[in-house]
Amino acid sequence: MTIRNFKILSGGGGGDKRKTETERLDKFLDLSDPSLIRSLREDDERRRRWLLALAALILGLLVGGTGSWLFFQHSASQPSTSLKVREERAVMLVAQGRRFMRVKQFEKAWAYLGLATEMAPGLLEAWDALGLAQFYGGQGAEAEKSLRKCLEIDPEYSRAYHVLADISFYAGDDLSLAKEYWKKAGARRAVARIGLLENRLSEVAPLIRQLAREIPDDRYVQVMIQAVRLGHLTPELRLMLEPAYLISRNPETALGWRLYYTQRYEEASAAFNRALTQDPRDGSAMLGRGWCLLRIGTAREAQSLFEQALVTWPSNYSALNGLAWSRKAQGQTEGAVKLWERVLELPHIEQVEIPESLKGLGMVYYERGDYLRASSYLGQSFTMNPYDPETEKLLNDSLQRLQTPAQTRP
């Protein structure tokens, strides 16, 4: 394999020209399809509604989500369009919404997924994806509503019970409710995990051995089977099983995260402060305020909040990632590297903090002149988050430098 002349291209046939959100959305909705255009022209009212909703969506995305209310207001269901067509469109919206969710572009994810639920109110996967995006984006109460909507559509939908249990677990509720939901979901791994954390190893050991036979590659199961073999849960293994997320039902915390994801950091920080005044142990608000301070440029104050969160929740991805960026901003790169490596070692490898952690490692090695290692981390980050132009630029530069003989580098 050769890396000669290898370059990440933005957008497609335009080479270095990055496609606008409008062009991406047009391609996504396949508005150039002659049959669809013909269909739209046959019904002027449907066309007017669709274009108005589309324009509102694009406006909302381009201004960071502040126009989203227009999009939701005008994306009502279209009676003249068949249910099958609406569901097909909604499925495409769900796919794109999930992509945005995985890279923490929640204002866009909520817009796409909200439109999907408007277009196909009975589509289970649309409500499921919206619930997850709300969960990851700090909207605890809204996430529960979306997941309960899943259960209205299908009372036996196990994934909804599983995530409802997760919310209960990560919100610090009484574990009895989480256990009830996990049992309904058939989530044996979660039941085993809780048993270990509650020091009931002998009770859950048979279940863990069974899971090890059935899903030996599962990273949580690999951690749990180590505890069974050792006969006890070591502090290191416990760290791998403790809560990795924080969720809050406080409306002020939810508001803070919505403001944060539209880059209104001062307003978001004020909302998080109000939430912490109401409940100083609101871990989600604590993290949110830390991220706001980091974005504003006060890394030392942000570090204090992330460290405070890690005292109670030592495996929280967001706190570990935020602390790493705080330390890097203060020139403590070795400490940042260790934290990012710890994030990558935790079992849930699809967590939304992973792309940023990979990017951070790539940046450190780029700055050290280790372009081979930088390219590896930046390449993984770019694969997971192709929407970050800084990662793309650093990756291209790292690859270019690898092609340039050392003696000719500046």
Image (tube, helix red, strand yellow):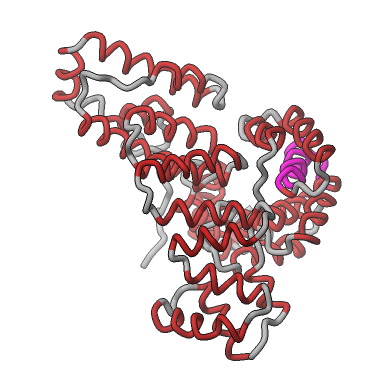
Query: Residue at 55% of width from left, 74% of height from top?
Result: 192
Residue stretch in magenta: 284-299
Query: Residue at 40% of width from left, 54% of height from top?
Result: 6
Q: Is residue 377 above or below residue 153?
A: below
227 or 359: which is nearer to us? 227
Picture coordinates of residue 290 (x, y %)? 77, 44
Q: Dominant secondary structure of the magenta stretch?
A: helix
Asked whether residue 405 appears in the rendered view, the answer is: no
Q: Is residue 177 above or below residue 214?
A: above
14 or 227: which is nearer to us? 227
- 215 horizontally vs 138: left or right: left
64 or 110: which is nearer to us? 110
Picture coordinates of residue 76 (x, y %)? 36, 20
Please tell me whether residue 291 belongs to the stretch shown in magenta.
yes
Picture coordinates of residue 373 (x, y %)? 57, 65
Please tell me whether residue 358 belongs to the stretch shown in magenta.
no
Q: Quadrant of the N terminus?
A: bottom left
Query: Residue at 41% of width from left, 46% of height from top?
Result: 151
The quadrant where residue 63 appears: top right
The quadrant where residue 41 appears: top left
- 9 horizontally vs 351: left or right: left
